[in-house]
Image (spheres, rainbow, N blue to C red):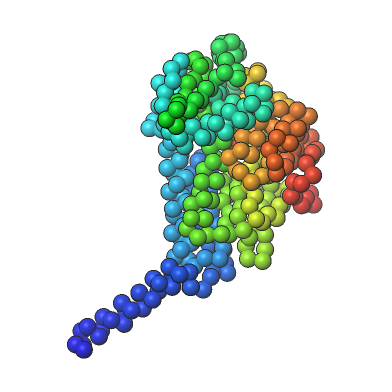
Amino acid sequence: MNSTYRLYILPVLVALLLLIALYLDLLPRSNTVQSDTRLAMGTLVTISVWGVPQVKAEQAMQKAFMHIARLEEVLAWQRPSSEVRKINQDSRGTWLPVSEELAKLVELGLRVTELSHGAFSVGLQPLTALWGFSSDQPRSEPPPPAMIAAWLAAYPALQAVQLRKNHDGAYQIKLQNDSVGLDLGAVGKGYAIDQAIAVLQQEGVMNAIINAGGDLRVIGSKGAQPWRIGLQNPREPEHIVSQSLLRGNVAMMTSGDYERYFIFEGKRYHHILDPVTGYPAQSGLSSVSVQGQNASLINGLSTALFVLGAKEGMPLLAAVPGSEALLIDLDGQRVQSKGFVVDWLQQ
Ligand code: ADP
Ligand code: MG
C-alpha cells in the first residue's frame, strides 16, 4: 500500500466509525443536562436536554430554535411579513385563504372562545394594540374611554373570527369587521413550545424541557430526577413561591398581571383584557397556572381562566381532560385543583 494513502486511512476510518456510532446511537449518553438559551417570543427561551451525546443535543436544540423563529415569523401580528399581519390587513369582511398551520391554531383558539363563552378571543388585536402593552413605547396611562367604548360597540364578540374548511381541504378565514384582528399572543407561545418539543423528539431527544420565561413543557426526566421548575411570586416576580417536580409529558403555562403592566393613579393595568369591558380583566386574580399535556391549549386556558376568575373559570377544566390549575388571588390566597403538581416553599 502506498504510504500517503496509509496516512489518510486511519483518520478517515475513525471519522467513519464515529459517524456510524452517532447514527446508531452507540456513543455514551451524556448524564449531564445540556442547555441553550436564546431570546425568542419576547422572552428568554431555554432548552435543556438530557441523555443524548453532545453533538446530537446541540443539533437538536439548534433545529428547535430555528422552528420557533420560523413560527414567530408566521404568528406575530407585529411582524411586517407575518401571515397574521397579512390577514389582519386583507380579510376584514371577506373570506381569505389561510395556511393549514395558522388555521389549526385559530381553530384551537376558537375552541377556547367557545369554552369560555367569549372571555377569550383570538380576535382582539385592535384592542390589544389600543392598550399597547406589546408596543415599543408602552403606555403609562389607559387609552381614552371613548376609544374603548367605540371598540366595544363595534366588536362582534362570538362572531368575530370565522374559519371554514372547503371541500378541497383548504382553509379560509374571515374577520367580521374592522374592530377584529388576529392576536394569537395567548396561544402562540404554547404552540411554539409544542412544535419545538416535536422537533426535539424527531431528533431522538426523549428527555427535555423548554422554558419560555416560565411557560414550559417537559418530556421524560433528568435521568433519575424529575425536572424541577419554579413558580414566580406575582408580587415579587424575582422570588419563587413554589416548585413543581415534573416528569413524563407535562406543560405548565402561566398568565399573570405582573408580566406586562403599568400603574396609573394607584391602579394596576395589565395585558390580559376582558372583551366584555374592553379593560384589563378584574377577576380578583394575580396569577393563573395551568398544567396539562398540550401547551397550546392550556396556554389559552390560563388566559381564559384569568379573565373569568376562580368561580366561573375552574369549571372549564372539566372540558379539557388532564388539565389542572392553580390560581393566586390579589391577596396571595391560593386555589388549586386536586391534581395540580406543586410543593410550596416556606415564605
Ligand atoms: P403572556 O403572553 O404574558 O404569557 P398570556 O399567555 O396570558 O400571557 O397571553 C396574554 C396575551 O394574550 C396578551 O398579550 C394579548 O396578546 C392576548 N390577550 C389578552 N387578553 C386576551 C383575551 N381575553 N383573549 C385572548 N387573548 C388575549
Ligand atoms: Mg402566558
Residue drawn at (68%, 38%), measured in percent from left and top? 320
Looking at the image, which is closer to me, 195 or 287?
195
Q: Position of residue 65 (x, y in %)?
A: 46, 50
**Quadrant the N terminus occupies:** bottom left
Q: Which image quadrant for residue 208?
A: bottom right
Q: Is residue 331 above or below residue 128?
A: below
Q: Residue at x 53, y 70 (%)?
A: 29
Numbered marks: total: 0
Residue 245 against residue 306 in the figure, above or below: below
Identify which residue, 39 or 50, lies in the foreground: 50
Residue 101 as seen in the image, left or right of residue 327 = left
Tell which of 26 and 256 is nearer to you: 26
Point out residue 131 in the picture as x, y percentages from the top left corner: 56, 23
**Rendering coords of residue 161 (x, y %):** 53, 22
Q: Is residue 15 above or below residue 292?
A: below
Name the spot of residue 212 as percent of width and height, x first: 56, 46
- Whether residue 235 is visible to the viewer of this picture, yes or no, is no
Q: As drawn, is 163 to the left or to the right of 218?
A: left
| Residue 93 visible to an observer of this rendering | yes
Query: Is 102 placed left or right of 158 in the picture?
Result: left
Residue name at image x 65 percent, y 50 percent: 250
Q: Residue at x 51, y 19 (%)?
A: 180
Instruction: Please identify the quarter of the rendering in which residue 146 is found.
Output: top right
> Camera-side residue: 121 or 162?
162
